[in-house]
Amino acid sequence: MDAATWTVVRLTAELAALSTALLLLLGTPLAWWLARTASPAKPLLAALVAMPLVLPPSVLGFYLLLLMGPQGPVGQFTQWLGLGRLPFTFSGLVVASVIYSMPFVVQPLQQAFEAIPERTLEAAATLRAGPLDRFFTIALPLARPGLVTASVLGFAHTVGEFGVVLMIGGNIPGQTRVLSVALFEHVEAAEFAAAHRLAAGMLGFALVVLVLLHLANRSARGARAA
Amino acid sequence: MTLTACLRLPRRDFTLDVDLQLPGRGVTALFGASGCGKTTLLRALAGLERAAGRVALDEAVWQDDGRRLFVPPHQRALGYVIQEAALFPHLDVRANLAYGRRRAGPAAQGFALDAVIDLLGIGALMARRPATLSGGERQRVAIARALATAPRLLLMDEPLAALDAPRKAEILPYLERLQRELALPVVLVTHAMDEVARLADHLVLLDAGQVRAAGPLATLLARADLPLARQDDAGVVIAARVDHHDTAYGLSRVVFDGGALWVGATSAAPGAPVRARVLARDVSVARVRPQESSVVNVLPVRLDSLQADGHTTLLRLRLGGAAPQDAAQAAPTWLLARITRRSADTLALQPGDALFAQVKGVALM
């Protein structure tokens, strides 16, 4: 692998890892809330989270660009904070990826949380476990397969995203030039050998991830039945 | 010790509206048809359901809307066991037992969990996961898990309803032993009269969220004016003790205030307390003591009241009928007898009549 490709792969992995970490941090409480609440705000919030599933990524990217740009409210806020502008930076990519990949993390988690019977959590309550205690000692361990699925899907989708990345990040080597964009560039320049290396690599990566996911969830179920 | 519950909670099908003082010892059964609010009441006692009102176990006030006080379930010193057991599937039996014990403070650390594990016969299951346990084993672990927090009150919601008859028979003796060996008040929700007859000391009859009657089990079962008396399995429960065994005929004699009964041989030792259940349909009456009858249990009684119900008549009989002057006796023992209305008319039965009750069947609980 040449130095430029290595930079692209490393940047992509960093982006996906950081985004996944943030996604789990934000998505887990959100999924827990969505799974347990009877609030009238639930449908609206669920729809907002699911938006990236139905919206063309370029549309999402366009609006994020406007929001985070110098005239946008988010852009003015980040400038006021002294963080500068987010578009065409690595931080901007992370923010966009988190928003774009949110449903792939929240939905498996929400389903896993919803599958936990209320009576199991109530049993924990009558055994002196407070709300946070119940969440960490009962809900999270029981939602483990959902947690694994959510991490893998969040990571993989961040790696694979193109439209949003191009809109927000552009194509700055070492900063925002990730795999999908680099692949597009190689194809544009008719460098098919280089394109093959990246494409086949991603294909292999996706296959390995899905097989591992399957194995992880099977062993989780097996551990529970055993 | 007293459990006070004054609770109100509107539901779709009924409004729970109770004002109860329950004895702080023994087993209190909440009994009624499904949908009468007994589970809702139990959940409100635990704080799992937010009803309006007040709940207190002696000086420990768990809810008092007047003082804007609501103690969440995890801060109430209670144990809660439900039909489905609700063991934690990701933890083995040992960790399930440790879960509440670890969180319940010093009282639970001093609690003799090993004795409960022996009592419930789950010592060999410690390393097993809940998914590998039978229904009866799961339920015993759930009971031990609740007891491991050293609660001051044990709430049980149909703990036996999910089990088939053999599993039920497996658990009932454990529940009885628990009752005898731990001085822990229990509130038990059930719709099975045999569980009530066997376990309960105190009975609360619920109907559409309201308390229809509440009181000692023997008193309520002997009342002819409650819906219980119209059931096919209507009958009384008599607190007795074993007098002696007749090994030659395989019979045991049990005695109680107002009489004695011969029953099929029991393994209980002489002097041991037993419960004798006599169904109304197994009791008939005669004006003179039957001679040369195969019925071994003939007891002198005095007719207290009659109540016609369709083609049958329900008789309320006071045992020890030969001595009407001792009406001041603290708690008389009663029998119910269901006879045909025709027999009641033929015998021209009147309240106050001295009769002989022939008891065809007695079940020791």
Image (cartoon, rainbow, N blue to C red):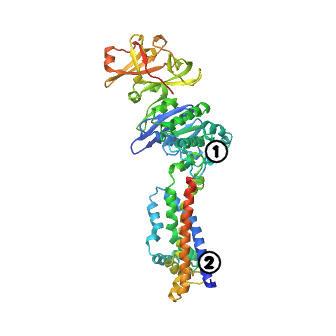
Q: Is residue B126 visible?
A: yes
What residue do we see at 52% from left, 33% from top? B28
Residue situated in front as seen by the camera: B331 or B22: B331
**Residue A47 location, x and y as percent?**
44, 65
Question: Mark 1 packing: few (<14 Cα in 10 Å), some, or many (20+)?
Answer: many
Q: Position of residue A63 (x, y in %)?
A: 47, 76
Q: Residue B264 carries which label?
A: none
Q: Where is residue B323 in the image (x, y as percent from the top left)?
A: 47, 11
Q: Nearer the viewer, residue A120 or B25?
A: A120
Disc 2: host chain: A
The residue nearer to you, when weighing B44 against B149, is B149
- Residue A170 visible? The answer is no
User: Residue A10: which disc?
Assistant: 2
How many numbered callouts? 2
Q: How crowded is mark 2: few (under 14 residues within 10 Å), some or many (20 or more)?
A: some
Q: Residue furthest bottom?
A: A189
Occupied quadrant, residue A154: bottom right
Q: What residue type is labelled 2?
A: Arg
Under mark 1, the amino acid is: Arg
Residue carrying label 1:
B101
Please state which of the two labelled residues, at mark 2 or mark 1, is closer to the viewer.
2
Picture coordinates of residue A50, whole percent (x, y): 46, 67
